[in-house]
Amino acid sequence: MGAEREGGARRRPMRAVAYAACGTVLLAGCASMPDSGDLRNVESTQRQDAEVRVFAMPPREDAPPAEIVQGFLEALTSDDPTYATARQYLTTAASRQWDPEESTTVLANGPDIRTERSTGREDAGDYAVTLTGSKVARVDRQQSYAPLDGHYAQAVHLTRDKKTDQWRIDAPPQGVVMGQSDFQRNYMSVNKYYFASNTASGAEAAAGTPVAAVADPVFVRRRVDAMTQTVRSVLTGPTHWLRPVVRSSFPSGTALRKGVTALSPDDQNRLTVPLNVTAAKVGDARCSEMATQLLFTLQSLTPTVDAVTLQGADGQTLCALGEDQARAVAARGAEKRPEYLYFLDEKRRLVRMPGAGSGTGAEPVPGALGEGVQKLSSAAVSWDERTAAGVGFDSRSLFVGSLVSGGPLGDPVLRSQGKTEDDRLTAPSWDARGDLWIADRDPARPRLLVLEQGAGSPLEVKAPGLDGRIDAVRVAADGVRIALVVQHEDGNSSLVVGRIERDESGGRPVVSVLELRPAAPELEDVTAMSWAGDSRLVVAGQEQGGVQTMRYVQVDGSTPEGPTPAALTGVQKLAASEDERLPLVAYSSADGIVRLPAGAQWQKVLKEGAAPVYPG
């Protein structure tokens, strides 16, 4: 079967655009469709202002197949809540079967249209085209984003309705398809929140055991009642990737009360959420957790919500919760703002300086690691800032010591047998449980290891699907996600994120890192990374073609909105706090230790310093 791509001219207008400004809605003129013409590429629109709303236009009477296909694809990128206009381009049967919520496929540009010559005859009563393009990502039914690459090809078939004599699509593409710029205009990323399965719940949490909140990023349609979409998504439960390691406090089957179609906060910035009967019998502690999940999530969506009230099916209040109460229920990111930034000075001692300060003076940490008895190549400080781990200057040995004056160093808790420094231990990382993670790069026995409470015999972590050698390890504050820089056989390195699972049913726990997925697919060589928020990392590396860059990335592989870090040459190490108010810090081969406060340029801290880290 032969196929021919038809296109090259600019797309004709197929949508009406409304601009909301100063409370007035102005409707743009709608251009009429051409009577005839070749099929054209459905190019993505330029990224438009957030206040711009795009409305689909219905099919024109006696529109030819070319126009029907273009109109349908344009309607997919509109702000039509139910895709009602897009369905007008389909046959009745196809409209019933087509499910736009199944998925959204994102292409580098809008889909190209290729006419299938063997079935592309208007006088034959049927017409077929193939949509093609370069895949960028897919958002699934759970609204979860996954990077993709490769070629996209999807057949679309049209038929002439026997009653109306109008062309309509009877075999549409699966789900929704659009170009990357249209996707960025239509969708926004929101962090849903659940609780780590290995932390306490209910009464235990109320007794003082912290609950770790875990971010689960999803994409919602930006201008189609994003708040109600987001609440429904939280109630539905975590995405498949995160589900094995988190729990929701909402009872299974919890939904919005029947008849509730839209949610909005009141003039006190409080959102009232009416729930169905399933949530009626929860206790006070569990209800507070439910409200905390929603409040954390809604604050990821908008700053205009600072309190949540949950109502039962009968309209009675189940519980009400504000920001201060939510922080008492669960820890989002680090439990407290790190007190210090840590790094190695010119004597290879572990030193510290106030994390939120603007000064450049540093002091050795209390204990043996700050005394310089053992020179270090890297270090990590526990989340409570009471214990530190350091890798010896030759990268062969791992030491653990308390950060108290006079504290002894003791013997190494781990040794590598690698023949060179590059084949030995990576920098270590602490998780929220107080366990210490590190990778041994020995080619004869490459391993990811965890030492429970930083002591004892290390556990070898299973990592099925790991393609290469681990060069860097960073565990998230929630303790259930881990970021790894992996070096591949071709010499390039990539950033992947995995899910930490623990089987404690036997004697010693069995620890695994599962379902590794790319977090920076646009970088072909990653040189440094650090967690920089609940679901965000900062990464330095090279783009395809060798251009050095530094950027923020989401754990799902998407690119967050907002500015990127200012350019910095020679970046070898990065340190960011999950408390996003603290400055980004880096080690540059050209400038030593530097930091980037919000809204400022890079500032030199210490020329001879190295290996900066925040707790974690």
Image (tube, helix red, strand yellow):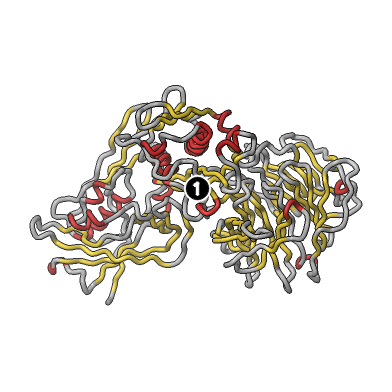
**Residue shown at 43% from the left, 35% from the top:** 281
Say whether residue 292 is left or right of residue 133.
right
Residue 373 visible to the viewer:
yes
**Percent coordinates x, y for residue 350 in the rendering:** 83, 47
Q: Residue furthest bottom?
A: 1
Quadrant of res 448:
bottom right
Say whether residue 300 is left or right of residue 502.
left
Which of 310 and 397 lies nearest the eye of the viewer? 310
**Percent coordinates x, y for residue 184 in the rendering:** 43, 48
Which of 313 and 75 lies nearest the eye of the viewer? 313
Quadrant occupied by the N terminus: bottom left
Residue 222 visible to the viewer:
no
Say whether residue 132 is left or right of residue 589.
left
* 166 in relation to 285, above or below: below
Q: Which residue has dot 1 on it?
A: 217
Q: Residue furthest top?
A: 267
Q: Amino acid at mark 1?
A: Pro
**Percent coordinates x, y for residue 574 in the rendering:** 69, 50
* 141 in relation to 250, above or below: below
**Percent coordinates x, y for residue 358 in the rendering:** 74, 34
Which of 541 and 450 lies nearest the eye of the viewer? 450
Question: Dot 1 surroundings within 10 Å: few (below 14), some, or many (20 or more)?
Answer: many
**Residue shown at 37% from the left, 57% from the top:** 110
Q: Residue furthest left?
A: 163
